[in-house]
Amino acid sequence: MARHLVHRATAVFAASLMLAGCVSTQAGRIGFDDGRDACRPQLLALDSTGDFYGEQILQGAAVGALTGALVGGLATGRWQGALIGAAVGGAGGAAVGYYAALQRQAGDQQALVLQLSGDLGRENAQLDRTLVAFNGLMDCRLNAADQIRLTVRNGRLDRSTAQAQLTEIRARFINDVALAQSINGRIAARGAEFDTAIDASVPGGKAAIQTASLRRPPVRVAPRRPVDIKFSPSPTSASIGTVAAGSVVAVRPGPPGFTEVQTASGVRGYAPADAFPTQRGTVAPEARDGDVRSLAATNISRRENFAASVNNAERLAQAGGFELTS
């Protein structure tokens, strides 16, 4: 039995080391440039933002594994104990490694909160960059598909060639979403580390912050005029649906100038705020430098927004958004 535990611990520890040392190549993540992808710059921009998240996650796991190894070795005086401790520590290190590092580096609670605030601020800025890069890539794909449909309608491209091109765009779109899901997984893992630190450092922890910053529930209204639903809150974003005047949809306040819209069929996106009757409620305020509670609230919100945008793109890929009749 003991030998089985040692072997299992050894395997887990070895896997952890392999994970920490395994850095996938860019070609492995997004493929080689075949010269035919008009959205390659946007794809590179999204991929480049993902490196930020991966490195820190691995560092947290390594801290947990090494701490566990030390504890296990000291407790038993044997290398088997160190391996078992490393396996246990590595399993929990991803969640507690960051907060443990904060405690080691900070001389007091004030210094700890100050460091946490700075880290949250940097994380929030990177989450903004990642969402902008993802939305830009998705818009590029969707706008390219719209351009192909327009070319067919103008009689400048036959339908079979057009559908083949749309099928290729859809395949690239699906790969893009898979990359974004991978990045989202790393964001979630880092989020767990931040949540641990928030729970330990902020009165009431994450639950209290979420309760205080809950968005208003959606309300059902009809637009004053026909309005396009955009994938992202930008005037140049790709249209993913249309709402007729008088058709009731669920809306929430969105970024400045936009309303978040969801139709009865599940289409989710953004539309100009002035197309709808004035709604009570405001966008969540931006985090103030050094205010750990507001920084934590916006961090949670940014994580949720990115995950929702990725899931929305996945739904579009499955809903026939790359057919000639779309």
Image: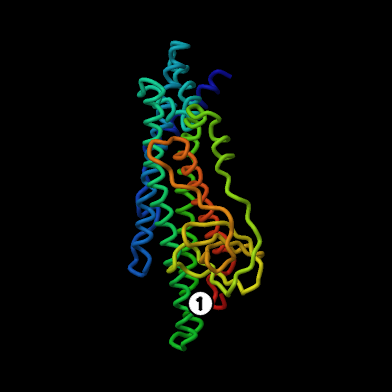
Quadrant of the image occupied by residue 208: top right
Q: Residue 268 location in percent, x, y?
A: 57, 61
Tag 1 residue = 163
Q: Nearer the viewer, residue 190 or 225?
A: 225
Q: Amino acid at mark 1?
A: Gln
Mark 1 Cα-neighbour bin, 10 Å: few <14, some 14–19, many ≥20: some
Q: Position of residue 296 (x, y in %)?
A: 47, 38
Q: Is residue 248 above or below residue 117?
A: below
- Can residue 11 be seen by looking at this rendering? no
Q: Residue at x 38, y 59 (%)?
A: 43
Specify how the rendered protein is coloured.
Answer: rainbow
SS at mark 1 in the image: helix
Quadrant containing the N terminus in the rendered view: top right
Q: Residue 144 in the image: x percent, y percent? A: 43, 72
Q: Can residue 96 be seen in the rendering of this structure?
A: yes
- Please tell me which residue lies in front, 65 or 111: 111
Left or right: 322 with respect to 263? left
Q: How many marks?
A: 1
**What residue is shown at x 55% (from left), y 64% (from top)?**
316
Query: Position of 325 compared to 81: left or right?
Result: right
Which of 171 and 256 lies nearest the eye of the viewer? 256
Quarter of the image with the C terminus is bottom right
Q: Which quarter of the figure has residue 15?
A: top left
Residue occupying the far bottom of the picture: 155
Identity of the residue drawn at 46% across and 18% down: 80
The answer to whether 249 is drawn above or below residue 306 in the figure is below
Q: Residue at x 51, y 22 (%)?
A: 6
Image side of residue 35 versus residue 170, left or right:
left
Residue 253 picture quarter: bottom right
Q: Position of residue 77 (x, y in %)?
A: 44, 10
